Image (cartoon, helix red, strand yellow):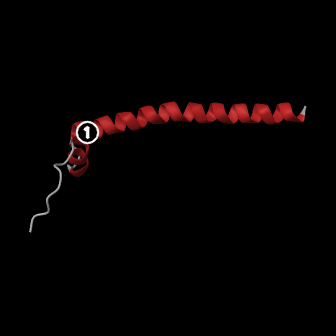
Amino acid sequence: ERVNRKPLGLLEKLAIKPPGPLERLTGNLLGLFERLVREPLRLFEGLVRNLLILLEEV
């Protein structure tokens, strides 16, 4: 019995399809870029928080 459902979207197809070398490379680059952006932001956030704590104590 066939269930009538909408055709898969592009993202769903990509999610189902095992990643090829290009997709894997792109994913790795995106992950690396995300880490490069997120790490300094987190460090900066910690720095700002510490500064605020120091200022409150003064």
Q: Is residue 33 left or right of residue 5?
A: right
Name the residue at the bottom extreme. Answer: 1
**Quarter holding the C terminus?**
top right
Where is residue 9 shown, x and y percent of the image? 21, 44
Where is residue 43 shown, x and y percent of the image? 63, 34
| Residue drawn at 68 percent across, 36 percent down | 46
Where is residue 6 shown, x and y percent of the image? 18, 51
Above or below for 52 versus 15: above
Where is residue 4 shown, x and y percent of the image? 14, 59
Q: Is residue 12 left or right of residue 41?
A: left
Above or below for 13 versus 58: below
| Residue drawn at 35 percent across, 38 percent down | 28
Q: Nearer the viewer, residue 30 or 12?
A: 12
Q: Nearer the viewer, residue 5 or 28?
A: 5
Residue named by callout 1:
23
| Residue drawn at 60 percent across, 36 percent down | 42
Amino acid type at mark 1: Glu
Name the residue at the left extreme. Answer: 1
Q: How many marks?
A: 1
Location of residue 40 (image quadrant): top right
Name the residue at the front extreme. Answer: 4
Above or below for 32 versus 17: above
Label 1, residues with CA under 10 Å away: few <14, some 14-19, many ≥20: few
Q: Is residue 42 left or right of residue 4?
A: right
Element at label 1: helix
**Quarter holding the N terminus?**
bottom left
